[in-house]
Image: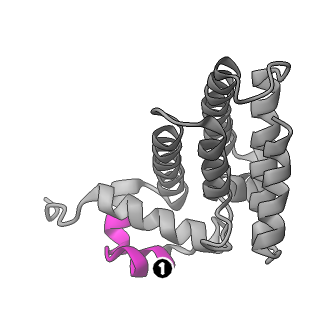
């Protein structure tokens, strides 16, 4: 009989998010994970089965956290445009770091060759687009945003701007320039 688990799996997944976000999937070795997570290799494989399985859990956790932040930031009373601006800038990570988005990075690194990455990314991007669409609809209803703006199309354009900015962030582009690009996308609303 093996020893009982002496670590919190949620805490380990949270730490794995940071490791994979910083290094990417391919560059992260099992030893990197063991060192960063503070668990043994046996525990890594017994609990998570594989690096790939832990990566999937990390991507899902990252997605949950990002969606919760986005939802909280877009809901409630007040003007929609400043909420959308904070949301797109936050999702793009401008000035916070140069890591981009874990999910965007995974798609860029692994493409659609990994069905789980494709599934998580499709789900996250769709849910972000849904949140943007609801906010844009509220802005249209209140008269704050152009009434001729089709909310789903505008939400898709904002999502594309955020994803593109995430990629550009990783190249070390000037945060001021990236901020202006996102503001231009918002001005179209």
Q: Is residue 45 visible?
A: no
Q: Is residue 41 magenta?
A: yes
Judged left or right of residue 90, residue 157 is: right
Q: Is residue 82 visible?
A: yes
User: Which corner quadrant of the image does residue 153 belong to?
Assistant: top right
Per the image, label 1 sits on a secondary structure element best described as helix
In depth, the one of 67 and 7 nearer the eye is: 67
Measured as percent of width and height from the top left, residue 92 is found at 68, 58
Image-based side of 36 in relation to 136, left or right: left
Q: Main secondary structure of the magenta part?
A: helix
Q: Residue furthest front?
A: 143
Q: Is residue 17 magenta?
A: no
Instruction: Residue 59: give x, y in percent of width and height.
Output: 54, 51
Q: Nearer the viewer, residue 179 or 155?
A: 179
Instruction: Please report the bounds of the magenta region as a residue range.
Output: 32-45
| Residue ID for mark 1 | 31
Identified at 79% across, 58% down, the residue is 165
Name which quarter of the figure residue 180 lies in: bottom right
Residue positioned 78% across, 71% down in the render: 176
Q: Residue at x 76, y 51 (%)?
A: 163
Q: Looking at the image, is 34 positioned above or below residue 156? A: below
Where 84 sits versus 173, above or below? above
Task: Please state, as top left, top right, bottom left or bottom right, where the C terminus lies in the image.
Answer: top right
Q: Residues within 10 Å of mark 1 (few under 14, many from 20)?
A: few
Q: Would residue 148 be found to the left or right of residue 114 on screen?
A: right
Front residue (pair 7, 47) = 7
Q: How many numbered tags mark residues here?
A: 1
Query: Quadrant location of the N terminus?
Result: bottom left
Instruction: Give how far across and how far down residue 11 sits, in percent.
Output: 31, 62
Q: Is residue 172 above or below residue 163?
A: below
């Amino acid at each position: 009989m093996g020893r009982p688990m002496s670590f919190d799996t949620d805490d380990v997944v949270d730490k794995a998010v940071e490791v994979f976000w910083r290094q990417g999937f391919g560059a992260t070795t099992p030893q990197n994970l063991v060192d960063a997570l503070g668990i043994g290799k046996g525990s890594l494989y017994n609990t998570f089965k594989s690096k790939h399985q832990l990566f999937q859990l990390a991507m899902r956790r990252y997605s949950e956290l990002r969606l919760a932040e986005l939802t909280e930031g877009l809901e409630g009373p007040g003007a929609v445009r400043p909420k959308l601006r904070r949301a797109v800038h936050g999702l793009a990570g401008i000035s916070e770091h140069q890591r981009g988005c874990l999910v965007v990075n995974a798609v860029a690194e692994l493409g659609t060759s990994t069905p789980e990455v494709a599934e998580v990314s499709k789900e996250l991007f769709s849910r972000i687009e849904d949140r943007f669409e609801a906010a844009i609809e509220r802005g249209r209803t209140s008269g704050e945003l152009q009434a001729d703006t089709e909310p789903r199309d505008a939400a898709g354009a904002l999502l594309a701007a955020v994803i593109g900015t995430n990629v550009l962030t990783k190249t070390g582009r000037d945060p001021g320039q990236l901020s202006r690009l996102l503001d231009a996308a918002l001005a179209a609303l």
